[in-house]
């Protein structure tokens, strides 16, 4: 055998062995990458319900809440404590509740040892009260935003928003619900007894490393942190007994990167009655509802005496290519919560056919069209800068915002201060689940969405509101922009580059 032949044979077999090794390693990664907890949850823990926040009403009618961000320890698993952060407690926070027209003030105290903020996600309020990255609260300091509730009944939420660290602050446990009521929806025959037939469900994914949270991002993951199991209201393996024929579930995806497609284990239909910013015009009978991070849905489910059913999250059918599906959570399934119906159920009225009229604009009065190209590296080709105003909006006008994702990975889009109407998805009328007031939408790769919103002010040229991808890792990395609302003809100010 010639020397060249020998060299060829040897290098050939080395190459074969190497490619087998690489292929094997990839196969091993591939098959191990999807997460599935279906049938594996023992449902041994009763679902915790976040307490309603105490409040007091001052002489001028202002409802005042106290929220303290604090370090804590919580026993998620028997006898084992995990370090956590929470509002007024060890993990998550109480549910704030206020009526339309009410003046509210929240006295926020930062008891952490680092600066943070509290943002009122979905709330229409002055920019200075928004709790975005320009309203930092130093460790040990307080902040007392106040505003008048001026929007329909809805399931909103609150969470920190320090630029570059939001994922971390939310993951440690800083999140809570903010429920708004109004007289019109109070009159509807919808289940409404908090914690009884009206259940807040804060869904998060989590991974434990021993007793502590493991927040590591996987090697192949570009979505951010994806946990290997879910919990609801901070309860692992949760079940809930219900004693009413119909139950309203207020679903909040408070996960930092994970998108869920919720449905029931027996594929029963449920009524979708509300989206992020309030009730739909009429209920939609659905078997699945998809929620990306930050989105909410209110559903009414009908129970039969003595039965059990499981709220489950199914694989995503619009998540992008096989790579995204496999390594970024699209293929994953979770058993989220077991509902156990009592042997005798209190009868509930039928879900009403009409729920009200939408207050979000239909776009016909829009005076301006803007376009947003979503890329992980930044929106419209630039990463977030604290001292740059990206968009200037005139108070009292309606606009259309067209959002496009061709980035090859899932993103979503959230706008502060407003609720919007989805006018079009890839040129078509939106599906039922996107026909209510929204402040956050899932924008899968290859999707263009046209949204309509109205900016009712007040004007503040110096203090921006945010728009961003609510996959918090993307947001932290700069997938965020700033807009100010100004009076007609007014110039934008120059926001500070510092988080002050
Ligand atoms: Cu839920 Cu800008 O945030
Ligand atoms: Cu927000
Ligand atoms: Cu994103």
Image (tube, rainbow, N blue to C red):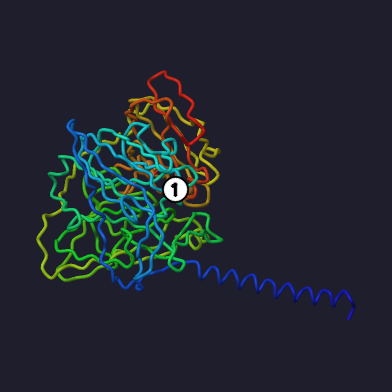
* Residue 328, horizontal then vertical, whole percent: 49, 59
Residue at x-position 30% and y-position 42%: 437
Judged left or right of residue 404, residue 51 is left
Mark 1 C-beta to ligand 1 under 8 Å: no
Q: Quadrant of ligand 1?
A: top left
Tell me which corner region of the image, top left, top right, bottom left or bottom right, holds residue 300: bottom left
Judged left or right of residue 69, residue 274 is left
Vertical side of 106 occupied by 82: above or below: below
Vertical side of 361 occupied by 169: above or below: below
* Residue 84, horizontal then vertical, whole percent: 39, 57
Vertical side of 466 occupied by 489: above or below: above
Q: Nearer the viewer, residue 333 or 95?
A: 95
Q: Nearer the viewer, residue 165 or 335?
A: 165
Q: How many marks?
A: 1
Q: Nearer the viewer, residue 199 or 29?
A: 199
Q: From where the camera sits, is residue 136 visible?
A: yes
* Residue 142, horizontal then vertical, whole percent: 36, 39
Residue designated by label 1: 113
Of the 4 image quadrants, the one containing the N terminus is: bottom right
**Helix, strand or loop status at disc 1:** loop
Q: Nearer the viewer, residue 458 or 162?
A: 162
Q: From where the camera sits, is residue 446 visible?
A: no
Vertical side of 422 occupied by 215: above or below: below
Label 1: how many Cα within 10 Å (few below 14, some 14–19, many 20+): few
Tell me which corner region of the image, top left, top right, bottom left or bottom right, holds residue 81: bottom left
Residue sticking out furthest to the right: 2
* Residue 395, horizontal then vertical, whole percent: 35, 25
Residue sticking out furthest to the bottom: 1
């Amino acid at each position: 055998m010639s020397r060249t032949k020998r060299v060829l044979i040897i290098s050939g077999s080395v190459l074969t062995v190497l490619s087998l090794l690489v292929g094997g390693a990839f196969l091993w990664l591939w098959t191990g990458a999807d997460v599935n907890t279906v049938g594996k949850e023992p449902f041994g823990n009763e679902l915790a319900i976040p307490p309603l926040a105490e409040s007091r009403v001052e002489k001028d009618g202002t409802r005042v809440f106290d929220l303290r961000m604090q370090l804590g320890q919580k026993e998620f698993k028997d006898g084992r404590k995990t370090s956590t952060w929470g509002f007024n407690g060890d993990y998550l926070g109480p549910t704030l509740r206020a009526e339309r027209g009410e003046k509210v003030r929240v006295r926020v105290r930062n008891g952490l040892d680092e600066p943070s903020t509290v943002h009122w996600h979905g709330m229409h309020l002055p920019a200075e009260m928004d709790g975005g990255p320009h309203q930092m609260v130093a460790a040990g300091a307080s902040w007392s935003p106040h505003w008048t509730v001026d929007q329909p009944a809805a399931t909103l939420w609150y969470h920190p928003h320090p630029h570059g660290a939001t994922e971390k602050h939310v993951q440690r446990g800083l999140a809570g619900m903010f429920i708004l009521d109004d007289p019109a929806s109070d009159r509807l025959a919808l289940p409404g007894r908090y914690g009884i037939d009206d259940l807040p469900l804060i869904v998060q994914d989590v991974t434990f490393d021993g007793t502590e949270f493991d927040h590591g991002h996987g090697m192949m993951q570009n979505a951010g942190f994806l946990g290997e199991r879910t919990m609801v209201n901070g309860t692992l393996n949760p079940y809930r007994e219900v004693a009413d024929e119909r139950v309203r579930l207020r679903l909040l995806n408070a996960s930092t990167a994970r998108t869920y497609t919720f449905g029931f284990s027996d594929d029963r239909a449920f009524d979708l009655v509300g989206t992020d910013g309030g009730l739909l015009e009429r209920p939609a009978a659905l078997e699945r509802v998809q929620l990306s991070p930050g989105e909410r849905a209110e559903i009414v489910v009908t129970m039969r005496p003595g039965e059990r059913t499981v709220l489950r999250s199914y694989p995503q059918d619009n998540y992008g290519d096989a790579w995204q599906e496999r390594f970024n959570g699209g293929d994953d399934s979770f058993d989220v919560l077991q509902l156990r119906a009592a042997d005798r159920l209190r009868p509930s009225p039928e879900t009403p056919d009409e729920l009200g009229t939408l207050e979000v604009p239909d776009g016909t009065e829009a005076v301006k069209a803007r376009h947003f190209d979503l890329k992980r590296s930044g929106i419209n080709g630039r990463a977030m800068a604290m001292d740059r105003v990206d968009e200037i909006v005139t108070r009292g006008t309606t606009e259309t915002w067209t959002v496009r994702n061709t980035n090859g990975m899932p993103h979503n889009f959230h706008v502060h201060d407003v609720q919007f109407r989805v006018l079009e998805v890839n040129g078509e009328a939106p599906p039922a689940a996107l026909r209510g007031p929204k402040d956050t939408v899932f924008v899968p790769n290859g999707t263009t969405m046209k949204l309509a919103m109205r900016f009712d002010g007040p004007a503040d040229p110096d203090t921006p509101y945010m728009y961003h991808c609510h996959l918090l890792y993307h947001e932290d990395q700069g997938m965020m922009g700033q807009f100010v609302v100004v009076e007609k003809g007014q110039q934008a100010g120059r926001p500070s580059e510092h988080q002050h």
